[in-house]
DNA sequence: ACTGGTTTCTATACCGGTACAGTAAGCCCC
DNA sequence: GGGGCTTACTGTACCGGTATAGAAACCAGT
């Protein structure tokens, strides 16, 4: 019963919860050690390495802890001492919101959560946007991070690099030395474009949502595209259409104004040289175009063929079903999580670059190009 | 240029990233201090309190840090020293997945994210499920947490309590001393039930999704209901129907099998004493019933009236629009985030209990009860 | 020259844990 | 009855920062 208190009793702190009166001393390992009459280390072992002490003593310690209202070793202190936090970050573009509203992103994140669940790792959501002097990518403790569809030159990504965290990049330009997961977007896009060509379409348009302008109905086929996946998709379309001499007009709206695609598409579809098919950057984009077609009384696919991208939930929810390029977001999530998990425990051995397939799924929204001159009433 | 190194040079650590060779010494404040020839404290100030040193020295320190590849003060160490982590937790039921797939939860979480964005706080998602010996609610560092629609007796919630973290409870039975945000679910449900009564309906059924069984098509009106919001909704319905002598049959499926509602509803709607109206626990549930009606060729609202709950996206996406009880999930998220934010910085002063309104929104899915004997073909 | 106020930097003591190398006691075995 | 193993616990030195109270230097005012 020596338990000589080597440290002075712990300091007083601001109350943290309603039950705490101001000035209630914090309960730490030392508090319990003093109470039971053992060393701080033994109390630590009681919680973290039960095999290091006798069951009876351990029970006495646990009882004392219970009695004193001790909630277990402080996570922060433990993280500092052990060098691991039990948390991984997911870096998303600007607004976290779309993580919760876009069901394609949702499927991906859900798969990550499921894959990570058995490991007990928690998920911290990080924004690229560094408003204020708190920059999550720099200031939040974590064991590693998943970078999902971010601008690789953004400050947030550089911070993660500098911190030398284990990283996995998803839907981004592959980075040497890091595990990466990508989808064969370009292949998929090519298949989509080829499908339309095979059906005899020549008057084809693009519909795009993206972060940067210009927005609206654009005639310039060379509209800049940002985002790795988006660029790849665009390249895939062009791979097929450019050699065929086709330079499509483009509809473009920012992510948060997807709804405006409908209006733009109405304009596009009202033109005398109305396209007979539209290649869309996502299923949601396709939905907007589809609604515009409905508005104008155009039939899909008789008057207008539509190809989406992702094969998300809406692809099958609408009638006729949407022809689209399927990517397996669940698999993408699982692989990404598994790779990060591996990077977390293994030494930095290999850094695989996965490319998941993207395959065309033909449903009812595409059909043969209408004969020249045969026009639905507008 | 004394800068006597009081601590030995920092230890060697396992490599954390691919650029790190094994055995690369970690760069800390001390490394930079030694390099520049100042004390560790001065380097710390260069990063955290710029006004405490001359601009020239600060610049020299920052340059040295840049050159040595220092990413800024270690978040974990800083958290331990300062007592704040820059992260808040959100505790969700069992699976995180539904945070990303349920658009009603998504709206709530998105609003939280938006509200929290300016503060720079990161969001950590926590599961109630404590698989393994890593229990997020106990072991993850955070400054406070939001408890969303959880079982108040679950171990995860008790851990948060024991840690004496600032907490805000949402869609849960209010807890004394803590800020709480709730929706007037019971009022809303009452309005929904009354609406059907007013339309002359007497043969009414309930459709429910919940975590626990029994599942399927149940005749027992006293099916147990769990989850605060769910209980409240059920109570609200019963408030109106029980006095009217109506004891509805119940359809019930677990959350992850919402799709089976359709099958159950088909069974329900095929019975000779087919209900003329169904009260549903959510819009998604209502969608399942609606599909069953479609399957059977029943017209909504002529043959069957449908009331949902939430007024989420699908309520307006289907034709006819769904009569439903509107709750403002955005506002719920904003309030919850704001309250937590307040609890984080203020002393535990007041702990408001907010109750947001729930109002009936009548759309096309409800109509007068069909005359007795008038039956649609089955 | 002495006092008092800044400014700028340093020394020390924490924050609340864990790793690791003891040490003392008990036990087995030849 | 002493060497070698375990078992059970302790002492010390960290982990990588920050708070706080000095100390040294400089400047102005009297």
Image: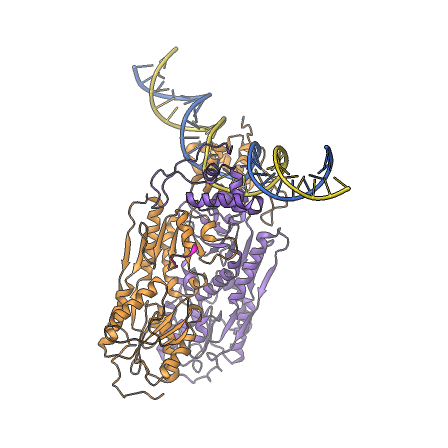
Chain colours: A purple, B orange, C yellow, D blue
Residue D16 position, x and y percent, is 52, 39
Q: Which of B84 and B222 is in front in this view?
A: B222
State which quadrant residue B53 falls in.
top left
Q: In this view, does A305 lie to the left or right of B344?
A: right
Residue in the picture at 44% in, 76% down:
A275
Q: How many labels does the image show?
A: 0
Q: In this view, does B222 lie above or below A300?
A: above
Residue B192 is inside the magenta segment: no
Report whether residue A377 is seen: no
Residue B344 position, x and y percent, is 36, 46
Q: Is residue A11 above or below residue B96?
A: above
Quadrant housing the C terminus of chain B: bottom left
Helix, strand or loop for the magenta stretch, by majority: loop
Q: Which of D28 and A150 is in front in this view?
A: A150
Q: Is residue B196 left or right of residue C15?
A: left
Residue A289 position, x and y percent, is 41, 73
Quadrant housing the N terminus of chain B: top right
Residue A202 position, x and y percent, is 49, 77
Q: What stretch is highlighted in magenta?
A: B151-155
Q: Is residue A80 above or below residue A2?
A: below
Q: Is residue A119 left or right of residue A252?
A: right
Report whether residue B289 is seen: yes
């Amino acid at each position: 019963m020596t338990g000589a208190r080597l440290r002075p009793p712990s300091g007083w702190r601001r109350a943290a919860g309603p039950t705490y009166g101001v000035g209630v001393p914090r309960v730490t390992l030392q508090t319990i050690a003093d109470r039971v009459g053992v060393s701080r280390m033994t109390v630590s072992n009681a919680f973290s390495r039960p095999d290091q002490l006798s069951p009876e003593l351990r029970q006495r310690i646990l009882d004392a802890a219970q009695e004193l209202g001790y909630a277990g070793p402080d996570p922060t202190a433990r993280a500092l001492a052990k060098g691991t936090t039990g948390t991984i970050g997911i870096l998303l573009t600007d607004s976290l919101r779309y993580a919760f509203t876009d069901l394609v992103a949702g499927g991906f994140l859900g798969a990550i959560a499921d894959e990570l669940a058995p490991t007990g790792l928690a998920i911290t959501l990080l924004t690229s946007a560094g408003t204020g002097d708190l920059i999550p990518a720099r200031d939040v403790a974590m064991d590693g991070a998943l970078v999902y569809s971010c601008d690789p030159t953004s400050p947030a990504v550089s911070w993660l690099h500098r911190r030398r965290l284990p990283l996995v990049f998803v839907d981004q330009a592959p980075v040497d030395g890091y595990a990466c997961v990508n989808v064969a977007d370009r292949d998929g896009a090519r298949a989509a474009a080829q499908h339309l060509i095979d059906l005899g379409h020549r008057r084809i348009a693009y519909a795009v949502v993206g972060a940067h302008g210009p927005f609206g109905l654009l005639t310039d086929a060379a509209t800049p595209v940002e985002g790795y996946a988006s660029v790849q998709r665009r390249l895939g379309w062009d791979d097929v259409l450019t050699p065929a001499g086709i330079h499509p007009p483009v509809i473009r709206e920012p992510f948060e104004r997807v709804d405006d695609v409908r209006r733009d598409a109405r304009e596009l579809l009202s033109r005398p040289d109305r396209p007979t098919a539209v290649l869309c950057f996502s299923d949601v984009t396709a939905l907007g175009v589809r609604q515009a077609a409905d508005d104008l009384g155009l039939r899909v696919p008789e008057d207008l063929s539509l190809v989406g991208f992702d094969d998300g939930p809406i692809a099958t929810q609408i009638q006729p079903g949407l022809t689209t390029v399927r990517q397996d977001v669940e698999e993408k999530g699982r692989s990404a999580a598994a790779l990060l998990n591996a990077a977390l425990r293994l030494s930095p051995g290999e850094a695989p670059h996965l490319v998941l397939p993207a395959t065309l799924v033909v449903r009812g929204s595409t059909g043969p190009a209408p004969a020249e001159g045969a026009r639905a009433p507008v």
